[in-house]
Structures are given as structure tokens and as C-alpha cells.
Image (tube, rainbow, N blue to C red):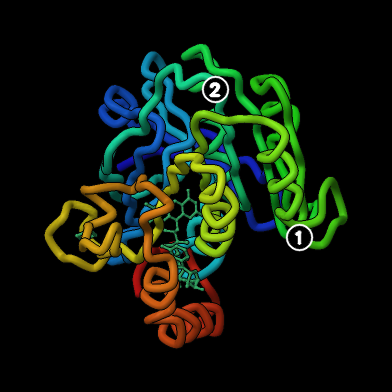
């Protein structure tokens, strides 16, 4: 059992949880993820580790309430316990002094990007950060990012704050030479970024979030195509060279169970919605 120590709403339907998990905190590194099960019979959901404190024995993660399980999780309170958390899973990010680095975090993935920004800055890089969301109310960690970045750009899809959309990236890339780029966010956003960085030959590492089940390379559900080869995002990733990723294939696979996911969330809400974790 993993006790929830702190809950914080960062934006509407976006929550940060800090949880007691000493054995995960001991080994966690930027870029890795956990898989949690809320109750005894709940589904397994992967979430990226957004922070860890080895002394306190805690980890944190940030999640968007998009479907049944994340909505259930969002109802949990400080002091309650999550049944199981497995991790840290996946490979950690490559953190070293690349030189001039561009970090782009979109939506809920702004949170794990903050961990990368801190680590890349500590490794001696010059860090330019871009954070983006659909609308200004969904932006968070702006001050924190500013404090750890040499430059910060803000963007929203509707232009309610900062630049409108990601087109301004082209201008930045034309003006300044970057040695390394990391992008985390919705798949469509990462695809868009890779199309912009490719002409500049800027290696772009993306975090892939396909549907996962075991997270240990056994079920094959998380398969993605990278450089024409099948990879399992949970054990071969979750970070990959974005210029080699088949994003369209990933988008198709992410939508495979959309009707079932919608039905499951609807039924759960109709039945009154609880945090017991059952299906
Ligand atoms: C390695 C990895 C790391 C992730 N890190 C985070 C994180 O830090 N924070 C966070 O909020 N989410 C993260 N996700 C996505 C998260 O796992 C899903 O949002 C979650 O499983 C949805 O569960 P649900 O039952 O609430 O919604 P579901 O009913 O399963 O789905 C509801 C909606 O969310 C979409 N969805 C489902 N699974 C995914 C997915 N894997 N990626 C994107 N969209 C999905 C569905 O297409 C549907 O539209 C990560 C996924 C992976 C694979
Ligand atoms: S989630 Fe099963 S192989 Fe990756």
C-alpha cells in the first residue's frame, strides 16, 4: 500500500500526488514511469515520475483526469492508500552536457519535463524551455521553469497566453543553433515538433505514451514502430528518436479502445463514481 501524502490541483483536472514509496524513490531517475493500480481490481495505468526525494522516500506524479481510472484517482485524498505502484519502469533519460538544449513540454507532460529541465541545467547545459497548453488556464509550473531555464517561451493553442500554437518554433530554430531537443506531450504535438526540428538536423527525443498493460515487455500492447522496427515502449523506451517514430501508427493504436474507454467512464459515473478501484 502506498500512502498519498500530498495532493495539489495544478490546473483544472490536473493533479499532483506525492506518495510514500521509498523503494521506488531510491532508484527513480528522470524519464522513468510507474504503473499504479488504485484498488484490488482496478486497471493498471502508467504515469511518468515527476519528482522523487530519496531522503523522504517519496515520489510524485502528475495526472490528467481523462478517463475512468484517472478520474477515480483524482477523487482520492491525502492519507488514503493506492493499492499497488510498480516502478521505476522504462529507461531513464540521457542527461549530460549537450551544450545548448531545447526542452518542450505540453499539457500534463509539462510536469515531467520540469524534472528534465532541472537535470539538464544541473548537467551544465544552456536550457531554453517551451511550455504549452490548449488554453492559459491549463498552464502550470511557469515560475519554476523560469527559475531553472535560461529562456522560457509560453504557448497556447488558442493564443490566450504567449505565442499561438507552435509555429514560432521555426523562427527560434532558424535564429539559434541547438545541440539537443527533448519533447514531451500529446502525440500530435510531438509529431508537429519533430516535423519542425528535422529540417534543422536537431536530434529530438520524444516520450511515447502508447497503451500499456504489464510495462515489462511481455504483453506487446505498447508496440511502436521506430526506424521501421517494432519496439516496446515500456522496455525499449519510453524515449525514442522522434525523427524515426511512426507517429500516425501510434495515434491509431492509442485510439483502438476509445468506445470502450468512453463507455467505461460513463458507466462508472452513472453508478455514482467511487474510488474503490473495481471495474
Ligand atoms: C509511459 C507513459 C507515461 C505516461 N505518463 C503520464 C503522465 O505523467 N500523466 C498523465 O496524465 N498521463 C500519462 N500517461 C497517460 C495515462 O497513462 C493515461 O491517460 C491513462 O492510462 C488513462 O487512463 P483512464 O482510465 O483514466 O482513461 P481511459 O479511459 O483509458 O482513456 C481516456 C482517454 O485517454 C486516452 N488515453 C488512454 N491511454 C492513453 C495513453 N497511454 N496516452 C495518452 N492518452 C491515453 C484515451 O485515448 C481516451 O481518450 C502516460 C502513458 C504512458 C504509456
Ligand atoms: S506494456 Fe506490455 S510489453 Fe510494454
What is the C-alpha distance between the residues marked 2 and 1?
Answer: 25 Å
Where residue 128 appears, x then y in whole percent? 65, 29
Where residue 6 appears, x then y in whole percent? 55, 35
Question: Residue under circle 2?
Answer: 118
Quarter the N terminus occupies:
top left
53 vs 22, left or right, is right
Quarter the C terminus occupies:
bottom left
Where residue 151 appears, x then y in whole percent? 72, 26
Q: What residue is shown at x 26% (from left), y 52% (from top)? A: 234
Q: Is residue 114 above or below residue 38?
A: above
Question: Residue under circle 1?
Answer: 157
Q: What residue is shown at x 40% (from left), y 19% (from top)? A: 96
Mark 2 or 1 closer to N-term?
A: 2
170 vs 245, left or right, is right
Q: Is residue 145 above or below residue 109?
A: above
Q: Is residue 136 above or below residue 256?
A: above
Q: Is residue 179 above or below residue 188?
A: above
Amino acid at each position: 500500500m502506498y500512502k498519498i501524502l500530498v495532493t495539489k490541483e495544478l490546473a483544472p483536472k490536473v493533479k499532483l500526488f506525492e506518495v510514500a514509496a521509498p523503494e521506488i524513490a531510491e532508484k527513480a531517475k528522470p524519464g522513468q514511469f510507474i504503473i499504479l493500480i488504485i484498488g484490488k481490481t482496478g486497471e493498471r495505468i502508467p504515469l511518468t515520475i515527476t519528482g522523487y526525494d530519496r531522503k523522504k522516500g517519496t515520489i510524485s506524479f502528475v495526472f490528467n483526469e481523462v478517463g475512468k481510472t484517472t478520474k477515480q484517482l483524482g477523487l482520492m485524498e491525502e492519507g488514503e492508500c493506492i493499492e499497488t505502484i510498480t516502478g521505476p519502469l522504462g529507461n531513464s533519460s540521457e542527461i549530460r552536457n549537450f551544450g545548448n538544449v531545447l526542452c518542450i513540454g505540453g499539457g500534463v507532460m509539462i510536469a515531467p519535463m520540469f524534472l528534465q529541465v532541472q537535470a539538464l541545467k544541473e548537467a551544465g547545459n544552456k536550457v531554453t524551455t517551451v511550455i504549452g497548453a490548449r488554453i492559459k488556464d491549463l498552464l502550470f509550473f511557469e515560475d519554476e521553469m523560469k527559475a531553472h531555464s535560461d529562456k522560457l517561451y509560453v504557448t497556447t493553442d488558442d493564443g490566450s497566453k504567449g505565442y499561438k500554437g507552435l509555429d514560432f518554433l521555426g523562427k527560434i530554430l532558424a535564429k539559434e543553433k541547438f545541440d539537443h531537443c527533448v519533447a514531451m506531450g500529446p502525440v500530435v504535438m510531438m509529431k508537429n515538433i519533430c516535423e519542425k526540428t528535422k529540417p534543422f538536423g536537431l536530434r529530438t527525443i520524444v516520450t511515447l505514451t502508447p497503451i500499456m498493460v504489464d510495462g515489462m515487455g511481455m504483453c506487446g500492447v505498447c508496440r511502436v514502430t521506430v526506424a521501421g522496427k517494432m519496439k516496446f515502449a515500456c522496455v525499449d523506451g519510453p524515449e525514442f528518436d522522434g525523427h524515426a517514430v511512426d507517429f500516425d501508427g501510434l495515434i491509431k493504436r492509442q485510439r483502438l479502445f476509445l468506445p470502450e474507454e468512453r463507455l467505461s467512464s460513463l458507466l462508472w459515473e452513472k453508478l455514482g463514481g467511487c474510488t474503490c478501484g473495481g471495474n
